[in-house]
Amino acid sequence: MKPLRVPAFAVLLAALLGPLNAAARGYTPQGGCGPHERVALGVVPAGHCVALVADERQGLRSPRRIVEVAPGRLWVIDMGSWEPRQGRLLELTLAPGARHASVRVLAEQLDRPLGLAIGPDGQVWIGEAGQIWRTPIPPAGQPLGQREVMLPDLPSDGAHPLKEIAFGPGGALYVNMGSVTDACWGDDQRQPIPCPELAGPRPRGAVYRAELDAANGWRVKRFAPFATGLRNSVALLALPDGRVLQGENNIDYRDENAPPEELNLLQAGKNYGWPYCVGKGAAARGYEKRHDCRRAEGPLQSWPAHAAPLQLLAGRAGSAYAGQLIVVWHGHRAAGHRVMRLPLGPDGLPKGAPQPLLAGWDALANVRPQGRPTGATIDSQGRLWVVEDFNRTVLLVLKPGADSLPKQ
């Protein structure tokens, strides 16, 4: 197995932003939002406010994903850092009248976890860098039960080791297998054709599909590449009809406006261009006149450069977000740090340009740090929850004066 490496961009970003974020991470409450402290953002859904539910005071380090496992109980993936074995699985609960949530540790020493989803078996599935496992949901206040590894020995090296997971109908599980490098640069600083990361039976820069056997306890009976040429698919969503959407974190140019991020509609066996092509048929730098980008599948939509899509979420039926695709943009440049929404057309696919749902998240002294959203979920009451890694927070979008507790 190749040695573990912390991605170079993560080391650089931590060095540049660490002291700044340590000084400016916290929010200054701007009144109340339900029973909680209110966070002031520039763009919030009409008639709603943003509540600060938990932050580093409750022990949060780098929350990345959140999902409701029962009314009033949410599980949070806290990656900890880019160093191995710093991650935790947390449970967040809200007591009657509490200003902040309580947080307890369910599992720790996880290896750069990201994926968090409830499977067709009713268990919670967790994606660590090198494996995917599942566990039953214990009764409230009880310790975590048995962990069962479902996909072991996944590659955990390189710049993009995180494993996003998404369940589709018919026992399908989609898994991100991010690229080792940004743009297939070798140790000799060359960009070969073909890119060796795409070669062999287990290519990187791909999304894989696991077939789960319902008759055999939902265990994996086949695991193989589904779509290739995808640099880092940490934003994945399987639609109810089985189609799969992917938010592409594209090659990291220094340019402010290039290359575009992408929303792709994935199809079995298709190649989406990485590392040779970006956007709609354009050659990536270093591959000009070396590859025919007309052969690569084009994106469903092009999004602003450096927006960094980190999660795709379907709006829950019966909620204010029904019929919408929710997209978490994490990027620290101007296009990023916001949560967007796109209406779904009659064919179930996004139509039109993304519109801000939560935005105006630029740093403002004595009010807020720059937004760093990494994940979101919609609970059984139709409320939107958002987690931030750098700011170490759990946020909840509420109607002013509403109680944040679940209906009993």
Image (cartoon, helix red, strand yellow):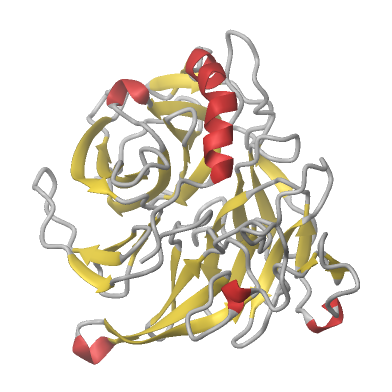
Name the residue nearer the viewer: 204 or 190: 190
Q: From this viewpoint, which residue is outermost toward the right?
A: 289
Q: Position of residue 170 (x, y in %)?
A: 41, 86
Picture residue at 78% right of the left edge, 74% below the top: 298
Look at the picture and state if 363 lies above or below 354. Answer: above
Is residue 37 rendered to the left or right of residue 130? right
Q: Position of residue 121 (x, y in %)?
A: 25, 74
Is residue 236 rendered to the left or right of residue 265? left
Look at the picture and state if 374 lies above or below 25. Answer: below
Q: Quadrant of the C terminus?
A: top left
Name the residue nearer the viewer: 302 or 4: 4
Is residue 241 rendered to the left or right of residue 151? right
Q: How many marks?
A: 0
Name the residue nearer the viewer: 394 or 128: 128
Residue 48 appearing in the image? no
Q: Quadrant of residue 102?
A: top left
Residue 133 appearing in the image? yes
Q: Position of residue 37 (x, y in %)?
A: 43, 18
Picture residue at 43% right of the left edge, 26% below the top: 52
Q: Quadrant of residue 335?
A: top right
